[in-house]
Amino acid sequence: MFKHLPNAPLADKRPTKATVHSVTLHDDFAWLRADNWQEAMRDPTKLPEDIADYLRAENAYYDAAMADTADLQAKLIAEMRGRIKEDDTSVPRKNGAYAYVMRYSEGAEHPVYIRTPRDGGDEVVLLDVNAEAAAHEYFDLGAVAVSPDHGMLAWKADTTGSEFFTLRLRDTATGQDSATLIADVGSVAWADGRTLFYVRVDAQHRPNKVFRHQIGSDPADDVLVYEEKDPRYFVGVSRLRSGAYVQIATGMNDENEVWVIPTATPDAAPVLIEARTEGLEYEIDHQGDQFVILTNADGAVDFKIVTAPTATPQRAHWVDLVPYRAGRMVIGLAAYRDWLIWVERENALPRICYQGPTGDAQSIAFDEEAYALGADPSAEYDTDMFRFTYSSPTTPSQVFDFDLATGDRVLMKQVELPSGHDPADYVTRRIMAPSHDGALVPVTILHHATTRLDGTAPCLLYGYGSYGASMPASFSANRLSLVDRGFHLCHRPCARRRGKGPRLVRGREMRAQDEHVPRFHRCRPIADW
């Protein structure tokens, strides 16, 4: 029997017409889009009062409609918090002379960024996000990037909820921020210890301009290095792992282009890898005298890996390294001095592959029927060590270090659930369900071992397929609140198509994904951290 709900607020109908491409559009609710929305994003008090009143009414309606679930909400929140280890520390990430970690303390909302000497020693707090957030009602940390010489820390934050981030620069020796503040910053990338590239967003939140900043100079004097004129394209900057280049990547969901700037000459003009072409996607990394390129060129709809000389990186010089194979989606790559690592997906399951000096491709094997992987390449270029995360619907996230030279893997961390968790209490199955056109679609099912399989159990079925986004068969502590109450949880793991939004952070899909990763790995892309 359905409960009686309070009356929902009804927005006024204020008919408007607009003609676009000779088509007249009718909209009764266009008034809910504030004409000054850009101003209101920065200062919510500027929102027109009639719009603000309607939003308040919607919130009040929600509160009233959900009032009788208050006790259940509190119980569920307690359950979920009980599965979170609040005093948690990431696995140290070695980079040069130091090892970097993020740490959470019990009751703290934000992490603390810490470093120690590489082989152990006294800790130094570089950024206590809780202390920075204390003076603000709202605080969202953005990018955090340490300079190549480890002397400076670039970090940004949004303190209003507008999603406009302000960049600050901190001396790691003193722990003090400089007076330099740069507003409306997107991604950042260090060229050297004194030169920083950053992207600024426009009033529509589109990242479209790249600037070069010299430490100690006035940001008003920063040099505009690149400006994207096409409003469909979004721009990002990053430093390639080798340290030899900063890249400017610009693109939309199904085409892009990349420019590079040598870090040895950061004031040099950007060099184009390959001009934007309709339907062409590619992303790059650098290794020795060549660029390694992941691309869909030449009909490789599931992507392939090619190489090109650094002196002539254009498409005419691309040579296949990992050839295209239909049905095998190559998701992302990372280049070390002696190794190439890539993540691919086949039959909806991910696989980590690598190739070294011998040229023989190998992969890392796993036993479970359905699982999720996250790749977290080293910040260092000259190394044999590769880090990845593993989980399944029944197995909480595990962090492994993998020796590419020997094939040995070492478990560095197992996510703990303080309230307890026994994987044997749960069952994961993977089935192939026929679609309307006869195609077999993989579906992952999770249920409690005691749940009856007679068709009476409730089921939560969900899926997502836009932009090639994947739904990995990962662990989620929050799902257990449903599964423990007798639910079957079913989802189709992924879509086949790769095409997605612009790659604003290099190798984002090589990073560990969503819920199967410890929270310190999914807080923010940490660039050169």
Image (cartoon, rainbow, N blue to C red):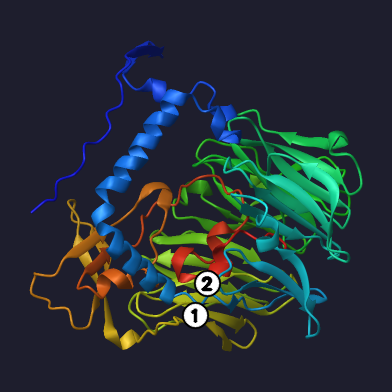
Residue 151 spot, x, y in % from top left: 86, 63
Q: Secondary structure at mark 1?
A: loop
Q: Earlier in the sequence, mark 1 or mark 2?
A: 1
What residue is shown at x 23% (from left), y 57% (from top)?
Answer: 439
- The answer to which of 89 and 213 lies nearer the viewer is 89
* Disc 2 crowd, CA 10 A, few/some/many (<14, 14-19, 20+): many
What residue is shown at x 30% (from left), y 21% (from top)?
Answer: 12
* Disc 1 crowd, CA 10 A, few/some/many (<14, 14-19, 20+): some
Q: Is residue 255 visible?
A: yes
Viewport quadrant of the C terminus: bottom right
User: Left or right: where does residue 245 sit relative to residue 36?
Assistant: right
- The answer to which of 472 and 9 lies nearer the viewer is 9
> Looking at the picture, which amino acid does disc 1 mark?
Val
Contact flag, marks 1 and 2 (Cβ < 8 Å): yes
User: Left or right: where does residue 170 sit relative to residue 302?
Assistant: right
Residue 29 spot, x, y in % from top left: 34, 22
Q: Is residue 358 visible?
A: no
Q: Secondary structure at mark 2?
A: loop
Residue 339 to residue 411: above or below: above
Residue 415 image label: 1
User: Left or right: where does residue 296 sit relative to residue 497?
Assistant: right
- The answer to which of 395 and 359 lies nearer the viewer is 395
Residue 275 spot, x, y in % from top left: 64, 38
> Looking at the picture, which amino acid does disc 2 mark?
Pro
User: Left or right: where does residue 422 sit relative to residue 225?
Assistant: left
- The answer to which of 326 and 425 lies nearer the viewer is 425
- Which residue carries the number 2 mark? 518
Q: CA distance from mark 1 to mark 2?
A: 7 Å
